[in-house]
Image (tube, rainbow, N blue to C red):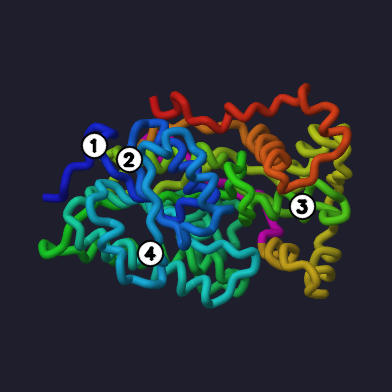
Amino acid sequence: MPPSTAPASPAETVVLVTGASGYVALHCVNQLLAAGYRVRGTVRSKRNEQKVAPLLRLPHANERLELVEADLLKPEGWDDVVSGCTYVLHVASPWPIVADESTVKTAVEGTLCVLRSSARCRSVKKVVLTSSCSAVNDGHENDEAVFDETYWTNLEHPKVEYYAKSKTLAERAAWEFWQNLDENNNRFELTVLNPTFITGPVLSDVENGSCTIIGRMMNVKTYLASPKACLGLVDVRDVAKAHILAMTNEASNGERILVHADSGWFSDIAKWLFKEFRKQGYPITFITAPNWVLKLYAKLGIDPIVEAVLPRVGPELRFDNTKSKQLLNISYMDVRQSVIDMIYSMIEHDMIKSTKKYRKHQQKHHFNKSKVEPVGMLH
């Protein structure tokens, strides 16, 4: 019989969060601490102040957060990292704007490293793995598709890039490993979450793929026009919340779950930002570029983000989030507000330069730092 995932007292429970300083992982740590859990977070180096300081500043970090150094490509020591943990949230995964074969290797080997140690440590009841919609919807030509958890990215399609390959192969490797666990192993439970494009407030000034893509839309010099591309969107706070709900929810055992709020075109996002920030001194444009212009610009090879977005040009992306609502009983935040909260937080963290008009209206704008606090989110 697999171990029960019925929740024990949070104060008696240690949760491992890999890549704890990352965009999503930092929110996971924040919400876990707020819910009373003891958290063990992995970082590559405890001497990296930019990444470690935001973790140590979280409420209750001094009481219940332990940071340990670990490298996903170095298996030695991971048994000690996992030992004593009841739950493992494997959030760490590379997301470079332009990926290559090394991205695939890191994702697959890193995932298996964590799972192997979890299979050797009897304390682990459940692993929640962060995958992506990139393991679901890439490489499909059906314009009418509504993607759900039964879809897998078609790795044979020529437009499927290395990042999507990394998430797909890492998730497939995880399921295969888990399904082959025998009585000689710790047969932990597994849930895989597949979030769509993640927006929402940052808790540190560490750059991430989402911030790079959305942040450049704040200036016409870095974002001349929107591609005719659509994104599935979800707030980072909801993604973190989904991890914690899945962690103790037996209904999610052995399940693959899309985490998705709504879809939006790049031009929609640009219009939201224009309406909110134009009067605060940010030169934002929301015109849409013809496809031929985008393709020509991408061929010049001067902007890796344009090259990365080009395969996304196409019809509206539609996802079915029924399963997440039914199994996790989760409701989703408004995606427009999520994007706006993201930009305000990036300005506050000096990831986007504040303007004179922004500073003048600072006391009037609606962004409230308390929004990033998870108080009550899990109840």
Q: Residue 140, percent across and down?
A: 56, 62
Image coords of residue 369 (percent x, y): 62, 30
Tell me the SS state at disc 3. helix
Tell whether position 324 is magenta: yes
Tell whether label 1 touches label 4 (CB within 8 Å).
Answer: no
The overriding secondary structure of the stretch rendered in magenta is: loop
Label whose residue precedes the other's in the sequence (2 or 4): 2
Vertical arrangement, residue 204 with respect to residue 334, above or below: below
Q: Residue at left 22%, top 35%? A: 8
The numbered dot on residue 111 is 4
Residue annotated with mark 1: 12
Residue nearer the viewer, 71 or 332: 71
Residues drawn in magenta: 312-326
Q: What's the distance in space between the residues labelled 1 and 2, CA to CA?
A: 7 Å
Residue picked out by circle 2:
38
Q: Give the numbered dot on residue 170.
A: none
Is 284 situated left or right of 28 in this image? Answer: right
Q: CA distance from mark 4 to mark 1?
A: 26 Å
Q: Residue furthest bottom?
A: 101
Quarter of the picture holding the C terminus: top left
- Nearer-N-terminus badge (3/1): 1
CA separation in Å, label 3 and label 4: 31 Å
